[in-house]
Image: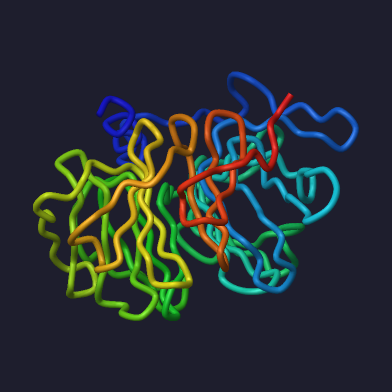
């Protein structure tokens, strides 16, 4: 419960990751040290996994060692893959990087090597950022905001959340993890109501098979096949989760300095990468 409260406090802006402060993402050869992973995504064009972290965007090739993309040591508080080589992000500038303390919504169309500002520079710091159904969903200071083009935004609800998942078959169905429990919206995020009997979850993702995967603050994996109404416990990701995504039959999670993956629906996990 304490980890979930802390995650929601960060998402609501009560706690901020200071740019350039504390720790490092040191590079030794091609290796990287993971720290504060805020978002995971798989590029559908290459199948490569990316992690938006406090110390830049990390690429995990299917073969070989991971490395930081573009040399930008920016604090990626929000990160989402839109399509091949097409990413969206938010957060704070890194050391030596100019601009406002909140970068707003930024976009890369070259796999994260370069970025341009789309909107809300100096105004928004999206800690939860999702792209689905041609829409962008972002949680900024306790507000759920939605955009059709990444430039004009509509505030749909005031809800403090740690994570958000959008049903891949229904843009009107959203699920959010909150301190009070799992919350569901059936009107695109205008209104949310708690899901009775759902486990306390921190992170959520929908799989390509239609299952909804959740991870508790302690790392226990829960899976729902009916949109979050009923849940069954699977395995454990191995610790407190930081980020979660799914692609094909793979579930990926960032857990305490490691990237772990499961190909059996979350029953077992293996370490994909562990920082030194």
- Viewed as shown, does residue 32 lie left or right of 216? right
Name the quarter where the C terminus is drawn. Answer: top right
Q: How is the image coloured?
A: rainbow
Q: Residue at x 41, y 64 (%)?
A: 206
Viewer-proximal residue, 14 or 192? 192
Quadrant, the N terminus: top left
Q: Residue at x 56, y 71 (%)?
A: 82
**Residue drawn at point x = 25 percent, y = 77 percent:** 172
Furthest toward the right, the residue is 29
Residue 189 percent location from the top left of the image: 22, 67
From the viewer's side, name the closer residue of 65 and 67: 65
The single residue placed furthest to the top in the displayed view is 22
Q: Is residue 101 left or right of residue 97?
A: left
* In the image, residue 48 above or below residue 149: above
Residue 258 locus on image (x, y percent): 61, 34
Which corner quadrant of the image does residue 10 belong to?
Answer: top left
Q: Is residue 82 left or right of residue 66?
A: left
């Amino acid at each position: 419960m304490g980890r979930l409260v802390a995650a929601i406090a960060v998402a609501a802006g009560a706690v901020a990751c200071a740019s350039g402060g504390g720790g490092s993402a040191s590079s030794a050869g091609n290796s990287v040290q993971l720290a504060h992973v805020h978002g995971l995504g798989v590029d559908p064009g290459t199948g490569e996994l990316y992690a938006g972290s406090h110390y830049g965007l990390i690429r995990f090739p299917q073969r070989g060692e991971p490395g930081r993309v573009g040399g930008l040591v920016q604090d990626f508080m929000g990160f989402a893959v839109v399509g091949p080589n097409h990413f969206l992000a938010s957060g704070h500038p890194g050391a030596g990087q100019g601009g406002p303390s909140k970068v707003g919504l930024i976009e890369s169309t070259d796999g994260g090597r370069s970025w341009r500002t789309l909107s809300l520079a100096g105004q928004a710091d999206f800690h939860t950022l999702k792209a689905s159904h041609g829409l962008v969903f972002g949680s900024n200071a306790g507000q759920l905001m939605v955009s059709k083009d990444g430039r004009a935004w509509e505030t749909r609800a005031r809800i403090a959340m740690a994570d958000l998942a959008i049903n891949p078959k229904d843009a009107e169905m959203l699920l959010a993890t909150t301190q009070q429990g799992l919350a569901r919206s059936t009107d695109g995020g205008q209104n949310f109501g708690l899901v009775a009997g759902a486990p306390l979850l921190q992170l959520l993702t929908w799989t390509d098979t239609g299952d909804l995967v959740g991870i508790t603050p302690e790392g226990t994996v829960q899976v729902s096949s009916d949109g979050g109404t009923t849940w069954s416990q699977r395995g454990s990701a191995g610790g407190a989760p930081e980020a979660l995504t799914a692609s094909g039959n793979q579930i990926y999670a960032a857990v305490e300095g490691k990237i772990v993956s499961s190909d059996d629906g979350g029953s077992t996990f293996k370490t994909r990468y562990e920082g030194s």
